[in-house]
Image (cartoon, helix red, strand yellow):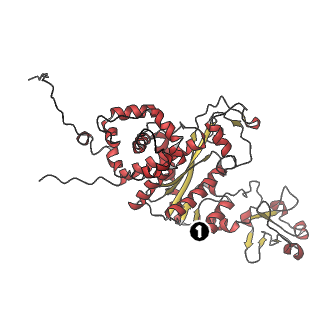
Amino acid sequence: MMGERTVSQESLFYSFSLERHVPGSHMLCSIDRFVDLSGIREHLKPFYSEMGRPSIDPELMIRMLIIGYCMGIRSERRLCEEVHLNLAYRWFCRLGLEGDVPDHSTFSKNRHGRFRDSDLLRRLFETTVERCMAEGLVGGEGFAVDASLVRADANRQTGGPGSEGLPPDVENRAVREYLATLDDAAFDAATPVVPKFLAPADPASRWTCAHGGQAYYAYSTNYLIALDHAVIMDVEASTAIRQAEVTACKRMIARVQDRFGVWPERLAADTGYGSAEMLAWLVHERDIHPHIPVFDKSTRHDGAFGRDDFSYDIDRDVYTCPAGQELRRYWQEGRAAKEQSPIDGLYRYHARKTARDGCNLRPRCCPKSPYRKILRSVHEGARDLARDIAKTDAYVTSRRERKKVEMLFAHLKRILKLDRLRLRGPNGAKDEFLLAATAQNLRKMAKLIPLPTQPLPA
């Protein structure tokens, strides 16, 4: 029999529980276990006035931001609308049914003010790392590092030539932050090369076409992850060039060691991190085994002898060519005693003139130059160690596990929708990258650590 909806008299009282209407399988239910905001009020207390009307609860704003970055809601205006309408979001924010949602403009005022001045978002991210370590998700044996480009909020049509600098009448927050980072090795001091174009809306962003497609303004988000469960140990924003990414890697490793006391045994990365200076820093200063391909341009493509054809005697500091002739830095003892470290960090080895003039293999040794010289870096010991590690099975495993970083970047852009920044300036990039990494760690814990099962009623 077909049923019919009957209209009854409305009840005078209702009993409604958000707990009953939010399913336990909802992702926010799993994430809520790992969100600890008990100390943010004390942390922010010096940045609030003791007089005036009570402000919006900072815990409420942080919980709303966590929802936005976990669920891929990039617009703060839309985030406020979703929290107002969605029961699960209200439950996570502890708003109940009648709680007021703050205006979207409140986020901007606090992000550019109290949250940034107090470094609250960095503290929030480090809290999630500490929780991952407490849950046993961080082994500390192997780390991996990589960087990915994220488009800046700057129109590629409005930029001007970098050689001309900024227009004198431009004045905004992004410009002030840009001027404050002129000496920062992760931003404008990373390279003396003048950028091709400069965006007045966000001058700290870098004009790049690293992906081989259309050029655009971008920042780099740098991740340092623990390879056990791909937990993000640290995140750093930098300008979109390789030198800045290497500097960011050093900062992250040092910060993780100082903040959490975690010293990785090995670091996996791509060839961009395989410079002699970087390898020497890892080996000699941090005692980390570099599972990194060595950045080497000594390979010959003209049929001549390559550098590998010359054997090196470390005790005598001498190279021997395929013809059996020795190559040294200096052949006079007096010059060797006065030797200083080379400015460019490269020692040069060459044979005696009498030996190379009568050599039968000279056409294959130096077909386009009068004599052959071998360049050896002052950090060649670290490079040799990296080459030896590259021959091991552990290196093959590290190369495979390093792809976990790229998977995190794909998740960041496709699932969390962070393929373009909404905030401008270096500080805006830092805030967005920190919140996104926090969301990824929370989602990681929610996935790997299941909710405890509720006992069935008797």
Could you tell me how many numbered marks the image carries? Answer: 1
Residue 382 at what x, y percent from top left?
Answer: 66, 67
What residue lies at 14% left-to-right and 52% top-to-bottom? 457
Up-down: is 192 above or below 373?
A: above
Q: Quadrant of residue 267?
A: bottom right
From the image, tell me which residue sits under label 1: 287
Q: Nearer the viewer, residue 392 or 291?
A: 291
**Residue closest to the far left:** 1
Quarter in which the N terminus is drawn: top left
Up-down: is 9 above or below 167?
A: above
Residue 101 at what x, y percent from top left?
Answer: 38, 34
Q: Nearer the viewer, residue 171 or 384?
A: 171
Q: Is residue 15 left or right of residue 327?
A: left
Q: Is residue 241 left or right of residue 305?
A: left
Look at the image and tell me whether residue 75 can be seen.
no
Q: Quadrant of residue 286?
A: bottom right
Look at the image and tell me whether residue 241 can be seen.
yes
Q: Quadrant of residue 165?
A: top right
Residue 138 at what x, y percent from top left?
Answer: 44, 61
